[in-house]
Amino acid sequence: MTATTPEADRRLSLGPAAARNLATTTKTRPQMQSITPRWLLKMLPWVEATGGTFRVNRRLTYAIGDGRVSFTNVGTEVRVVPQELAELALLRGFDDEDTLTALADRFVQHEYQPGETIVSHGSPLDEVVLVAHGKVAKVAPGEYGTEAAIGGMADGDHFGDEMLAGIDRNWPFTVKAVTPVTVLTLRADDFADLNGRSEAMRRHVQDMLAHKGKPQNAKGESEIGMSSGHDGEPPLPGTFVDYEISPREYDLAVAQTALRVHTRVTDLYNGPMDQFDEQLRLTVSALRERQEYDLINNREFGLLHNADLKSRFQTRSGPPTPDDMDELVSRRRKTKFFLAHPRAIAAFGRECTRRSLYPEGTTVDGKVVAAWRGVPLLPCDKIPITEAGTSSILAMRTGLEDNGVIGLHQTGLPDEYEPGLNVRFDGITEKAVATYLVSTYYSAAVLVPDALGVLENVEVAR
């Protein structure tokens, strides 16, 4: 005998729970939380890299050694890595480890607190200064009796290496600590003493000075001789455009995965949605997310690591202010867009609100986005945020015609599913599992250095 509940005795019609057994459910496609707008992939012009390699030919550039140096520390004692001293202008390419080690030993460590002066305008330029940790600001006397901010520097930057060339001059600016700063300094007397003892270093410095003296334009490119404003028939200078001997080549990188689907699943459970299509859709989305991550963070071709050091700027006070964004956009023509972490965009919005500024948005690809000076400010969560709460903001000019930043791919692949991405059937195992190899090939190239700028050490947590 089956017991019944009072509710069942009183029911006058079929209940919802039983009725659902006969109903067809309305369902969504499989959702994926990690899918983002992928603005970088949308905004980059994509160029064919036939043969899997793209070569960027440029005019010969004489600019030498403008890199950053690295340091090691034991407790609070900081030391420059000797080999990294080859990043200084006149030591670029110098590889005598014994001499570099002896030179590193002569650097002296100093600590400064915020507001303290590291070097003063007008005092003798008699030392090289390496910023080991912290942020400093460069200021100079302005035309109207006030200080003019001319830039900032942070970990790994250096200044004063003109001293190595024996140039007798005074500091053209004042450098002050913005945060607690650790610097290493090398006095002119110490360098002269070591340079006098090392024939290899002395010969290297002389060769570099001779190289640096060749005619070049403001960008460091070999000069194209010409004459203008003349009268009569003076002899015109002969010239030619010199090219880099070893131009950079970009090889296409690859992101791949093996998608496995049991044949029983694709045979029996394909309604109302195709199981293989949904598996492939989500797999392709994940590969595209990895592609955008690599375009930003890969050490070989990622934009954060390949921005020219002269195109890297520091914030004035930490958070991204309108002044910082103006500095970033003014350093290149035809800036196409900014790219920033959503938290960095929020930090910039707070700074605008603090100044009672309310920038108008703009429309990109049918969507309203934030903008500054009419340049779209696009979100990208692939730009990292450090444990200290700092991030970076990128600004770029794009396209082959404008000597900008471009994406690289190759289309027309076998079994191509999307441009630059293919799906190849890789067989069925003895367990009836079908395997598909999903691959996408990509890279990015900065055609000329000023096409890409980076605002570094942007505080997003203040």
Image: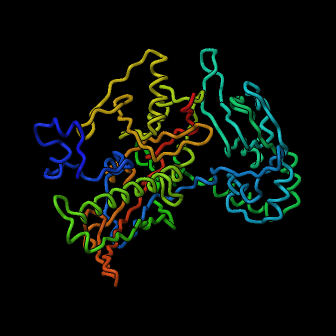
Query: Quadrant of the rendered structure where residue 9 is?
Result: top left
Number of numbered discs overlaid on the protein picture: 0
* Residue at horizontal 45 percent and vertical 52 percent from the top: 448
Residue 122 is at least partly visible in this image: no
The image position of residue 106, as x and y in percent, is 86, 50
Q: Nearer the viewer, residue 268 or 110?
A: 268
Q: Quadrant of the C terminus?
A: top right
Residue 119 left/right relative to 247: right
Location of residue 272 with respect to 228 vertically, above or below:
below
**Depicted 304 relative to depicted 416: above or below:** above
Image quadrant of residue 183? Answer: top right
**425 in relation to 303, above or below:** below
Q: Quadrant of residue 254?
A: bottom left
Foreground of the two, 254 or 448: 254
Q: Is residue 387 visible?
A: yes
Which residue is situated farthest in the left direction here?
A: 13
Residue 33, position as x, y percentages in the image: 37, 47
Instruction: Judge by depth and name the residue closer to the eye, 458 or 268.
Output: 268
Q: Residue furthest bottom?
A: 430
Q: Find residue 20 and report its horizontal and vertical position in percent.
A: 17, 48
Q: Residue at x 77, y 37 (%)?
A: 125
